[in-house]
Image (cartoon, rainbow, N blue to C red):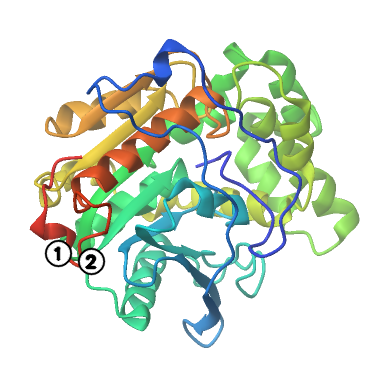
Amino acid sequence: MPTAFRAARAGHARNRLRPTSDTSDNAKPDSGMDLRTDLYAPIEPYDHGMLPLDALHTMYWETSGNPHGIPVVFLHGGPGGGCAPEHRRFFDPSVFRIVLFDQRGAGSSTPHGEIRDNTLPNLVADMERLREHLGIGQWLLFGGSWGSTLALAYGEAHPDHCLGFVLRGIFLGRDGEIDWFLYGLRQIQPEAWRRFAEILPAEERGDLLRAYLRRLFDPDPAVHVPFARAWSTYEGSCSTLQPKPDLVREFSDEATALARLEAHYFAHRCFLAPNQLLDNLYRIHHLPAAIIHSRYDLVCPIVSADELARSWPDAQYTVVPDAGHSVWEPSVRAAVMRAIEGFKARWSHRDGAPHDDPNHGSRAP
């Protein structure tokens, strides 16, 4: 699903919106623990590479932090968003072995923007190939927006390889969620929706997805680039509670892969059966999870997070009261950081050194 985890290709940082420390009441952890809410200092990978996936696709991956730490994999949004250096900063580099990778067609993975053989089952299989390549037994999954979709799909396919989940901006890949993005948002963001729709002839606005697909995949950049920017700008305009022109401009940059892959996945109903992720949740409901969603998330309405939380009663569910979809909103970022720090606190020795096997520690987030 559309996401504010979108970023420059890994290794080539853009000037992103710089999160600031959250000073609201929401920054105070309910548990009484003094958990960090600001990002860690920038770090560089200690290893990276290009992993062949099949005859067509090759995945960019990187690892940073502690090579012997708790494995955590960051799942970017979109699909098509790609990872960025700032995504490493959600994790304590002394405790976590931080794995970032660009999904098929995204970021530095090749071919860029490619939709052939680009399906959700293939993304799940790619994660397994990467896990085995890195010699990881189990890892913590962190995904926001579309990343939450991929995290759930992977977990339900491979529960024995999961330590737990930090899920933000929940998107379950259902028809109603896709229709909301294409049409429902006009009820709250009519100006942004008009800019999104009115780039098309009036007679084609009844089927926005079909009309956009035809133009996004036109080989002529003079055709596909303006429509990719219109799609991505629409997403960026709806991603924060208050207008953030810098974020909107960022979404409009290098927008082709994001727009093409999102439209491709939407056209195929995200390669999911109706309600698949909730129906198969029993496969992972024994694992620890933190679910974080903003009350005023317009891109991914909170009803999906509410349904997920009610279906996963042992999960820790946090509703952020004063933000939209973007993880760079201060209170969203603070809630995400608290969730990750909560896992760290329970999986670390009292002296601060990480367990070699987090399963020897508490499994509650």
Q: Is residue 272 visible?
A: no
| Whether label 1 touches label 2, CB < 8 Å | yes
In this rendering, is residue 53 above or below 122?
below
Q: Which residue is mark 1?
A: 160
Q: Extreme front residue here?
A: 351
**Residue name at image x 42 percent, y 51 percent:** 92
**Residue name at image x 12 percent, y 44 percent:** 285
The amino acid beneath tag 1 is Asp
Q: Is residue 342 visible?
A: yes
Measured as percent of width and height from the top left, residue 232 is found at 70, 40
Q: Nearer the viewer, mark 1 or mark 2?
A: 2
Measured as percent of width and height from the top left, residue 332 is found at 47, 28
Determine the secondary structure under disc 1.
Answer: helix
In this rendering, is residue 274 above or below 254?
above
Measured as percent of width and height from the top left, residue 50 is found at 55, 81
| Camera-side residue of 183 and 81 | 81
Q: Which residue is mark 2?
A: 138
Measured as percent of width and height from the top left, residue 264 is found at 56, 54
In this rendering, is residue 179 above or below 359?
above
| Camera-side residue of 264 and 35 | 35
Give the side of residue 105 with respect to residue 250, left or right: left
